[in-house]
Image (spheres, grey):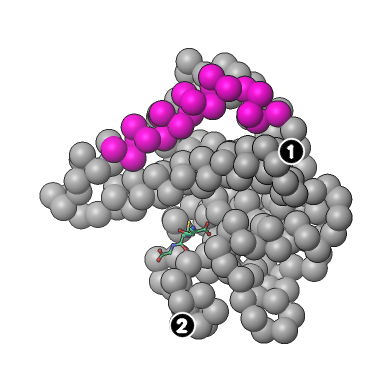
Amino acid sequence: MKLSYSPTSPYARKVRAVAHLKGISDRIELVAIDTWNIPESLRAANPLGKVPCLTRDDGSSLYDSPVICEYLDRLTPAPSLFPSEGEPRWSALRLQALGDGIMDAAVERYVEMHRPPGTQMREWSERQANGIARALDRMESVPEEFAGETIGTVSLACALGYLDLRFPGDHWREGRPALAFWYEMCSNQAWMIETAPSLARQASK
Ligand SMILES: N[C@@H](CCC(=O)N[C@@H](CS)C(=O)NCC(=O)O)C(=O)O
């Protein structure tokens, strides 16, 4: 399988983290994409022209990150990152949506920052920043939600890693000791260390 990714994309990191946790990283060839200059080959595989995109051995592709992650999760039985049913499933999927939503808002804010001066919309950036802050506050108030290891916790960890990469001045840990402590524990895990954004390619989205 081939994974089109960018070394700084939090969504692609989520997929790589899942592959690592499932012990199948060696079955996936990584194809680096410059997300400011999307090649035609990626548009052919994913009409949205976004990473991550997984091209399977039969040539068919899967996107976006929630779909790829669930596909990878089913390739081997353990550990299962997508609870199969009941409240544990909704809880994991909700947390994934929250982590992915933080990524959406942070990427949006980062792109906005790169618009030429005079064309940037401060209100739009603030709206994204406020959404991120509310999501983090919600998580801080329900630490039981990020116990265990599911697609939700993987997504949240990758989202927090992206905030550190792009918005270190936000100091998201301030006033959120539970989340900060949990993230510290995650950061020491091999799946986080192995997938950390490469500093050499920080320019891409
Ligand atoms: N919902 C998608 C979001 C993917 C996404 O936005 N990827 C960004 C990189 S972080 C991208 O490829 N952007 C290229 C573009 O929009 O032109 C997912 O979960 O995979």
Q: Can you say which quadrant of the picture contains the C terminus?
A: bottom left
> Mark 1 = which residue?
149
Q: Amino acid at mark 1?
A: Glu
Q: Quick one: label 2, few (<14), some, or many (20+) residues within 10 Å? A: few
Q: Which mark is residue 192?
A: none
> Is residue 119 located in the magenta-colored stretch of the structure?
no
Q: Can you say which quadrant of the picture contains the N terminus?
A: bottom right
> Mark 2 = which residue?
40
Instruction: Check the image and name the residue furthest to the front.
Output: 86
Q: Residue at x 34, y 32 (%)?
A: 130
Q: Which residues are magenta?
A: 127-147
How far apart are labels 1 and 2 at the CA level? 36 Å
Query: Residue 57's x, y, as percent?
Result: 74, 80
> Is residue 128 located in the magenta-colored stretch of the structure?
yes
Name the front one of labels 1 and 2: 1
- Residue 27, quarter of picture: bottom right
Relative side of 78 to 164, left or right: right
